[in-house]
Amino acid sequence: MTFLLHFSFSFFSSVAFGFIANIPRRALLASGFTGAVGWMIYFYLNQLFRNIAFPNFAAAFIIGCLSIFFSKKKKMPMIIFYIPGLIPLVPGGPSYEAVRAFALEDPNAGFQKLMVVTTTAISIAGGLMVTSLVEQIINKWLRFRRV
């Protein structure tokens, strides 16, 4: 039941953001699936490792790989699938809590939440960079193999 609930909410949040961002309609289901799979990877790795860096990195990497796959399959830019797929991973709650803690003059809690937000952002960016690096290596290897 938990799997179905998490999968469906992350799917619909990715699709809703894609709809708001006005991506092509034929990309909505693929971007929703990308976001849902990314969230499930994050959710289960977070329970397994009990930290935020590796689950966010792994989820961003998988989202990047799925975005590349769907971009080649549907002949559309990768960013159309990647950005809505990242929406479930965005640390909106900790960002709000950090600002709230600073507003309530609790800098220790504010800096703690700010570190969560920073770690999450760096992990997501690292996942995208590694995805791009792996794609370039595979493309060069395929080009070299054809020659």
Image (cartoon, rainbow, N blue to C red):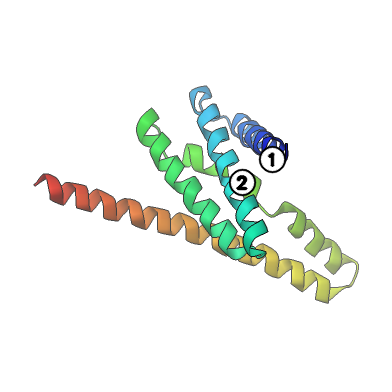
**85 vs 137: above or below:** above
**Residue 101 located left or right of residue 118:** right
Q: Residue furthest right?
A: 104
Q: Is residue 75 visible?
A: no
Say which of 115 and 102 sits in front: 115
Lower position in the chain sequence, tag 2 or tag 1 = 1
**Residue 134 located left or right of residue 1:** left
CB contact under 8 Å: marks 2 and 1: yes
The kind of residue on which mark 1 rests is His
Q: Residue at x 74, y 59 (%)?
A: 95
- Residue at which label 1 appears: 6
Quadrant of residue 36 within the rendered picture: top right
**Residue 16 located left or right of residue 82:** right
Q: Residue at x 65, y 51 (%)?
A: 43
Q: Residue at x 57, y 49 (%)?
A: 41
Q: Is residue 59 visible?
A: yes
Percent coordinates x, y for residue 21 in the rendering: 59, 34
Position of the N terminus by quadrant: top right
| Residue count near mark 1 (Cα–Cα under 10 Å), binned few <14, some 14–19, many ≥20 | some
The kind of residue on which mark 2 rests is Trp
Say which of 42 and 115 sits in front: 42
User: Residue 39, labelled with which disc?
Assistant: 2
Q: So how many labels did they put on this image? A: 2
Say which of 41 and 84 sits in front: 41
| Residue count near mark 2 (Cα–Cα under 10 Å), binned few <14, some 14–19, many ≥20 | many
Label 1: state its secondary structure.
helix
Percent coordinates x, y for residue 60 in the rendering: 52, 52
Label 2: state its secondary structure.
helix
Q: Residue at x 61, y 29 (%)?
A: 19
Percent coordinates x, y for residue 45 in the rendering: 60, 56
| Cα distance in 3D space between marks 2 and 1 | 8 Å
